[in-house]
Image (tube, rainbow, N blue to C red):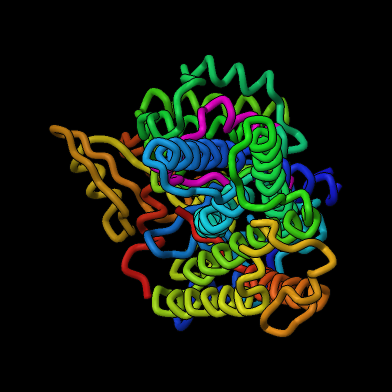
Amino acid sequence: MVFSIEVNNLSLKYKNFEALKNVSFNLENEKIYGLLGRNGAGKTSLLSVLASYRNPSGGTVKIAGECPFENPNIMQNVSFHFETDYHEETTKVINMLKAVGKYRPNYDAEYAEYLINLFNLPLNKPVNKLSKGMQSVLEVTMGLASRSPVTIFDESYLGMDAPTRMKFYDELLKDQERNPRIFILSTHLVSEMDYLFDEVLILQEGKLLLHEDYESLTSRGFSATGYINNVDKFTDGRKILNSQQLGNTKSVMIYEEKTEDIENEARKMGLETGPISLQDLFIHLTDGRE
Amino acid sequence: MKKNSIKKIAADMYVEQMKWSVWFIGIIMIIYLAFRIIGRLLNFSFTQNLLVFSAGSSMVYMFVIGIIAGATFLPQFLKLGVTRTQWFYGTVVSAILKSVTLALIFSIFAGIEYLFSILFNFEIDGSILNNFPASFLLYSFNLFVGYLTGWLINIGYYKFNWIVGFLFIALSVAFNAVYALIWENSIITLYSGNLNNFELEALAPSGLSFPLSVSGTLGIMLLILFIIRALTRKISVKIK
């Protein structure tokens, strides 16, 4: 059973501040969804409604066709992991994981053990004595091993160092292949994580700016690389999102769909074309807009 | 499924907080024994039994763990996919169990002490065995009311700002005052075993009979629980 998510005209208000405004989208398949947005765009607000940490002020949320708020059948199947303040948590890592095993119906203890070894997680240390990085590792270990049909990670990997993050991304993809579910990953590390996403949602000032699959989103633009003069000539009159130069070589990101004609034109000028990066697109789409 | 979760939550909270209680019981016992030994050495009269001695501190202890546990466990349980409703009922059940367990533990120690007082012939206030059921009930009530009033304060602070939090302290003090008014000195009188069951009617100087005092106490408990439930039914849980 797929725990599809339907969000309709969702709004969330904190006193006088409207954190979410009429957000609507459907997540129907067991895919990895990237949730992007600048600081204060409403990412955590949206995720906390999906995880029933908050009751929406307006609109509806349905998970597996039911309202998730205070619904035990849904809530036990939705895991929400965020950068948690553990400085007062004296429980040992092992007991923390045992508690997860007790309450999460799909928890896989064997897989948890595999992750513990993979990440060298010290089992007998109190959680507040772990380094920030290890606390993040514990967070994602609980999230992955819960195998919840809806698993949400809200920046929970920020404390990890780069090699550990790579291990986590790798593991996420492997486990998604074995046990497909809806993953929602919210992040600022766009360029590092873009390859994980099947679909991307971008929030902008509490509104949903777009929801598209990764491929069609990145086909909104393209990159062109080659001799500086040729690149400049080629880009004349075109919208450039980003450009980099090394000696006589220049690489630019262009916001325009790459048609066959454009590709031919570039080839004639000796330029190499490629896909645009999600990061550049994200910056362009969310920068300086009202 | 739902009932099972409440049982699980109640059991987990009970075990966690009884771990803290082991410390509390140990400390009370040490202080109590110290009083007894010093009383013997310095020859002053110290005849309070353990139930009387521990009554006040046990209530304060439950009040404090009520404050600590109030909303602290809620984010943890929510993270495990538990609903607010399940957490609420789990907390209530575990608080009742804790109240009864502590009352039972101190009663057992007081009983042993009473036997010792006969065997080794030392003086101790009355016999709690005279009116044990009423003493036990009242002792448990004390602890449960202590826990609930602590819990109420924490929820007030968690849900609102610190100014409103102060109002919840006032509310909690008011509930405790009404509770004390219902029972007045009867708490100490009962524990010290100066009355037997047949005299319970005359217990409450507030003029209330024993059954009426019990009903009043249950009323206070239900009112506090109602307020806590109303405040937490849809409470937003902070992300931190």
Q: Is residue B189 above or below residue B22?
A: below
Question: Dividing the image into 4 quarters, which one contains the C terminus of chain A?
Answer: bottom left
Q: Is residue A74 a member of the stretch shown in magenta?
A: no
Q: Does the magenta run of residues contain A97?
A: yes
* Range covered by the magenta-colored residues: A75-101
The residue closer to the viewer here, B230 or B170, is: B170
> Can residue B135 be spotted in the picture?
yes
Position of the N terminus of chain A, as image quadrant, is top right
Question: Residue at the location (49% across, 66% down)?
Answer: B158
Residue A111 screen position, x and y as percent: 66, 21
- B63 to the left or right of B135: left
- Front in this rendered view, residue A90 or B236: A90
Q: Residue furthest left?
A: A247
Spot occupied by residue A97 in the image (x, y as percentages of width and height):
60, 30
For image coordinates 27% across by 40% down, the residue present is A251
Q: Is residue B64 above or below residue A13?
A: above
Quarter occupied by residue B63: bottom right
Direction from residue A204 to residue A249 in the image, left or right: left
Res. B22 image quadrant: top right
Q: Is residue B230 above or below residue A117?
A: below
A248 left or right, relative to B82: left
Residue name at image x 58 percent, y 67 percent: B149
Residue in the picture at 64% in, 62% down? B142
Q: Is residue A196 visible?
A: no
Residue A129 drawn above or below residue B223: above
Q: Position of residue B129 (x, y in %)?
A: 77, 49
